[in-house]
Image: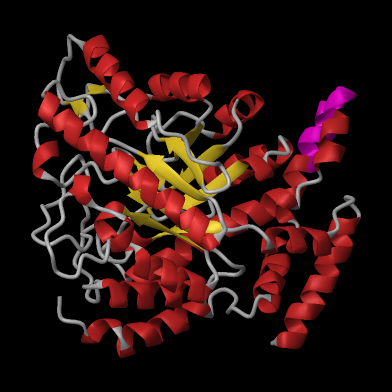
Amino acid sequence: MKRKIIQAYKCAREKYQKFGINTDLVIKKISKMSLSIHCWQGDDVRGFEVHGSELSGGIQVTGNYPGRARNIDELRQDIEKALSLIPGRHRVNLHSIYGDFSNKKVDRNEIGIEHFKSWVDWAKDKKIGLDFNATLFSHPFSIDGFTLSSKDEKIRKFWIEHVQCCREIAAYFGKALNNPSIHNLWIPDGMKDVCIDRIGYRSLLKDSLDKIFSKKYPEKFLKDSLEPKLFGIGSESFVTGSFEFYLSYALKNNLMLCLDLGHFHPTESVADKISSLLLFMKGILLHISRGVRWDSDHIPLFDDTLKELFSEIVRCNGLSKTHIGLDYFDATLNRVGALVLGARSVQKAILYALLEPVKILKNFEEKKDYLARLGTYESLKTMPFSAVWNYFCFISDVPSDPDWLQEIKTYDTKILTRRKN
């Protein structure tokens, strides 16, 4: 098998070289790229709060596949297994509900560094970075659909304090690990039906954000991003934190914007937004999921949407300004396998984009030789991409496709099926 992988790669390298693509350099480049692997796929977004609330805020996880992580140790075990099957070295993304609360009730506006020290110790041991998210859903103070834009001053103050705590924790991650932590903010605020006072709610959100971001942290420790959404379950008609609102606020305040692939209209191209954003923003964060009709959180696949997204980023020379995270949850199948499948799909899309002869295609375009541009673009679809991918897996010491599935099956039998949820 080793000999076949190497032989296939050598043939692929020669073919790509005819387009001016050095596959060795491409593999070296993608090997240095880190994905932010989200922890919440492992336990169906439950977290480890004592007496935590049921899922709310338009978030639903379907399925009851056996083996859900029930505590921090099991979740870390599952993440470590997933990381062992994903080429390269990556990061882990936490929500605030995943603190080490030692079986004590700690409300969201009281969380602190002490509740995440064990995560930092674990990250140091694994030599990985950590990212963070405030959790403004699944709480009694989010039950009416509004948090940072709530017209109840008590509720709004509570959530402002929560996000302030979360930014402090994220900055602690960045400093302790000597690796900037991205804190991403998404809120579920919105209305199911007609909203009359849109500007009222958005004015309150703006005021909340002004208070939250009044405290500055060094960027070498903390990077902030805002995540919009078009609509959600229970907020079909109005979402306070829309794309236009967060884009405006992020540009004015020099923050990053997070683009979740499942948070836009199904026919809307996220790839088409990249060139505009990169011209004006210091950076963007991607949350990779796969929208299916009204559900935004399916496992990413190596499909046209993902390929177009990363092709556009590479064409814009924007990889250095793009941070890539995963954000989906599916309990209908093996959760660890879902992490691996989604991450590897994203990596395939990045690799596919890096193997595109952008200079040649742009040259055709500038000469107005549109037939050559389109013909070459089409011919790339039958290039031996899989040989390069398998070689990347081989030199990264992880199984190639579909061999990793056997690893997951073994883990399922020995570990997951023995857990009693």
Q: Residue at x 22, y 75 (%)?
A: 66
Q: Tell me if residue 327 can be seen.
A: no
Q: Tell me if residue 213 can be seen.
A: yes
**Looking at the image, residue 251 lies above or below residue 312:** above
Q: Is residue 216 left or right of residue 284?
A: left
Q: Is residue 281 left or right of residue 113?
A: right
Q: Measured from the top left, where is residue 3 in percent x and y?
A: 77, 86
Check the picture and name the quadrant holding the C terminus.
bottom left
Q: Residue at x 43, y 54 (%)?
A: 172
Q: Measured from the top left, where is residue 236 in percent x and y?
A: 22, 27
Q: Main secondary structure of the magenta part?
A: helix
The foreground one among 66 and 419 is: 419
The answer to which image quadrant residue 396 occupies is: bottom right
The foreground one among 13 and 258 is: 258
**Looking at the image, residue 272 lies above or below residue 244:** below
Q: Measured from the top left, where is residue 240 in percent x and y?
A: 28, 23
Check the picture and name the quadrant holding the N terminus.
bottom right
Q: Is residue 216 left or right of residue 293?
A: right
**Looking at the image, residue 135 lies above or below residue 34:** above
Query: Which residue range is magenta in the image?
Result: 365-376
Farthest-out residue, bottom: 414
Q: Residue at x 15, y 44 (%)?
A: 56
